[in-house]
Image (cartoon, rainbow, N blue to C red):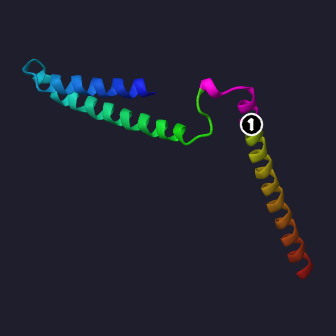
Amino acid sequence: MYYARGSAGESRSMLRLCESTARFSNFKSEISNLITQATGISKQLHGWLGSLKDSNIKGDKYFDKQTKRNVEQDKEFEEFDREMERYKRELEEKLMQRGVDKQA
């Protein structure tokens, strides 16, 4: 991703160079749009890099079987917690409904 971000920066630099050259004066609007897109891509890559830095996964080099098992186990725990929360809400709704039925 660092390479991609660097390439986006190089592309932006080349576009700025073209923008200031008389030979490309007919394409100023298109070049400006491309510069804006390259800037957006660079920002997006920066965001992705930041989120990867903050994650538990350090990269393919460190993503061994144990790490993979840990990540899968964490996902399973999260899914279990979501399911338990759903069951809890359903039970609370049923209990509330029974209370309403008894009062009626």
Magenta segment's dominant SS is helix
- Quadrant of the rendered structure where residue 55 is? top right
Q: Nearer the viewer, residue 23 or 39?
A: 39
Closer to the camera, 19 or 47?
47
**Where is residue 42 drawn, in percent x and y?**
37, 33
Q: Residue furthest right?
A: 102
Counting from the top left corner in percent of width and height, residue 44 is at 42, 37
Give above or below for 56 relative to 17: below
| Residue at 88% in and 69% down | 95
Residue appearing at x 9%, y 17% in the figure: 23
Q: Label 1 belongs to which residue?
A: 70
Q: Residue furthest front?
A: 62
Q: Which residues are the magenta region?
A: 60-71
Whether residue 63 appears in magenta in the rendering, the answer is yes
Horizontal placement of 25 versus 61: left or right? left
Toward the left, the furthest residue is 22
Q: Residue at x 87, y 66 (%)?
A: 94
Residue found 16% across the figure and 24% down from its top: 17
Q: Pointer 1: residues within 10 angstroms few (<14), some, or many (20+)?
A: few
Query: Residue 84 is drawn in which quadrant?
Result: bottom right
**Residue situated in front as seen by the camera: 20 or 95:** 20
**3, 80: nearer the viewer:** 3
x then y, percent, for residue 36? 28, 35
Q: Is residue 38 above or below residue 53?
A: above
Name the residue type under label 1.
Asn
